[in-house]
Amino acid sequence: MMRILARGPVTRQCSPGDIVQVTGIFMPAPSHGFQARAAGLTHETHLEAFKIVKDKECYSEFLLSDDMMGRVNEVKAQCADEAHLF
């Protein structure tokens, strides 16, 4: 798992479930306090995002065309008549 840090307008460009491409730079995340003393010279790294491009949106964002919506309503009506719609 990779930690990605997005700031400013980049933060609202994607939502959970989206498949995205992220452009950015690897940055060290220094540890503080007791964690820093125990870790020694190691740092955690994160990706600071500059650009986020959606490859695939989550399914709730897809819009059905009028033709497809008509077909869905036909199937829904057939299933309701036959009592097979749950």
Image: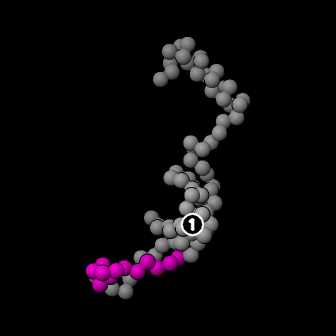
Q: Amino acid at mark 1?
A: Gly
Under tag 1, what secondary structure?
helix
* In magenta stretch: residue 67: no
Q: In this orientation, does residue 39 appear?
A: no
Q: The N terminus appears in which quarter of the rendering?
A: bottom left
Q: Is residue 67 left or right of residue 14?
A: right
- Residue at (68, 25) in percent of width and height: 70
- Residue at (54, 72) in percent of width and height: 48
Residue 81, image x and y in percent? 55, 13
Q: Is residue 84 left or right of residue 37?
A: right
Q: Is residue 42 left or right of residue 15?
A: left
Residues 32 and 3: in front is 32
Q: Is residue 65 above or below residue 44?
A: above
- Residue at (58, 72) in percent of width and height: 24
- Residue at (46, 76) in percent of width and height: 45
Residue 59, image x and y in percent? 57, 43
Q: Is residue 60 above or below residue 51?
A: above
Residue 65, image x and y in percent? 70, 34
Q: How many marks?
A: 1
Q: Name which quarter of the figure residue 36 lies in.
A: bottom left
- Magenta residues? 26-37
Residue ID for mark 1: 8
- Give the residue furthest to the bottom: 41
- Give the residue furthest to the right: 67
* In magenta stretch: residue 31: yes
Q: Is residue 17 above or below residue 3?
A: above
